[in-house]
Amino acid sequence: MKIILPLILLACLIYTTIGPAHAGFMPYGRIFKATQDERSYLTQTQDTRLSLKLRKSLSINSPSSLLSVSPYVYLKHAFLVGTVKSDVQRNVLIENVKKMPDFSGLSYYLPIKQDIKGEISNLELKLKGILEPDYPSSKFSLKVVQNTVVLLGVLSFEEQEKVLQTIKKIAPANKIINFLQTIPADNMKRKRIRPLRSLFD
């Protein structure tokens, strides 16, 4: 039962992410990312559902922001990252999330849109990061907003240090916004003991 429950939660996480319309598609990338995540499968499932709920709320209350603002949820904490047209639009987005009782808090980086030449891209940084040793690219999210690198996800202290050092090395960015979180001890995945390996180690 202890083995089956995490598998059921992982299946729920995948289903809520891709939806029934993609039932014939096996999302190996999402499965791998879910297994690498420090959060328990239950927490991942809850965060995914909240993320979809947040995206739906934005599409209803501020549909024009969907192309420029990305919503994220980690450990029930909401994040809004992107550009806005005005202070009024930013305030609308923030107040909309604050009215939702599901979240433990809100963090955001929402500068007003400006024309910037030579802006670095998310893809460029991701490709550079793959070449770096011990860089946990599958365990966090990265978004570039007007040459500012925003980091989101749940990593250990050691992994956070590695990510920050690597980003400073590969990204010619003006600034780094660190929204990375550390997983609480009671929320971590339980590592299953392998009796035979334990016996002979």
Image: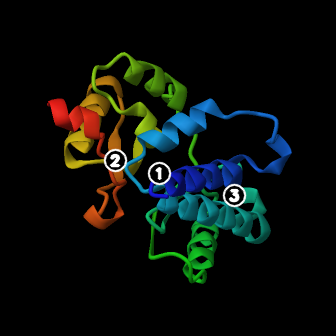
Q: Nearer the viewer, residue 89 or 123?
A: 123
Amino acid beneath label 3: Ser
Apparent side of residue 26 relative to residue 178 in the rendered image (left or right) = right
Residue 111 visible at all = no
Q: CA distance from mark 2 to mark 1?
A: 8 Å
Instruction: Give coordinates of residue 5: x percent, y percent.
Output: 52, 57
Instruction: Give coordinates of residue 76: x percent, y percent.
Output: 48, 68
Residue 185 visible at all = yes
Q: Nearer the viewer, residue 96 or 189?
A: 189
Amino acid beneath label 1: Ile
Amino acid beneath label 2: Arg
The residue that disc 3 covers is 65
Do the residues bearing badges 2 and 1 touch, measured as CB atoms within 8 Å? yes
Do the residues bearing badges 3 and 2 touch, measured as CB atoms within 8 Å? no
Mark 2 crowdedness (10 Å alpha carbons): few <14, some 14-19, many ≥20: few
Q: CA distance from mark 3 to mark 1?
A: 42 Å
Q: Residue shown at 60%/66% (left/top)?
A: 50
Q: Residue shown at 56%/65% (left/top)?
A: 46
* Mark 3 residue element: helix
The residue that disc 1 covers is 3
- Which badge, 3 or 2, is on the more N-terminal residue? 3
The residue that disc 2 covers is 192
- Which badge, 3 or 1, is on the more N-terminal residue? 1
- Residue at the extreme top: 131
Mark 3 crowdedness (10 Å alpha carbons): few <14, some 14-19, many ≥20: some
- Which badge, 2 or 1, is on the more N-terminal residue? 1
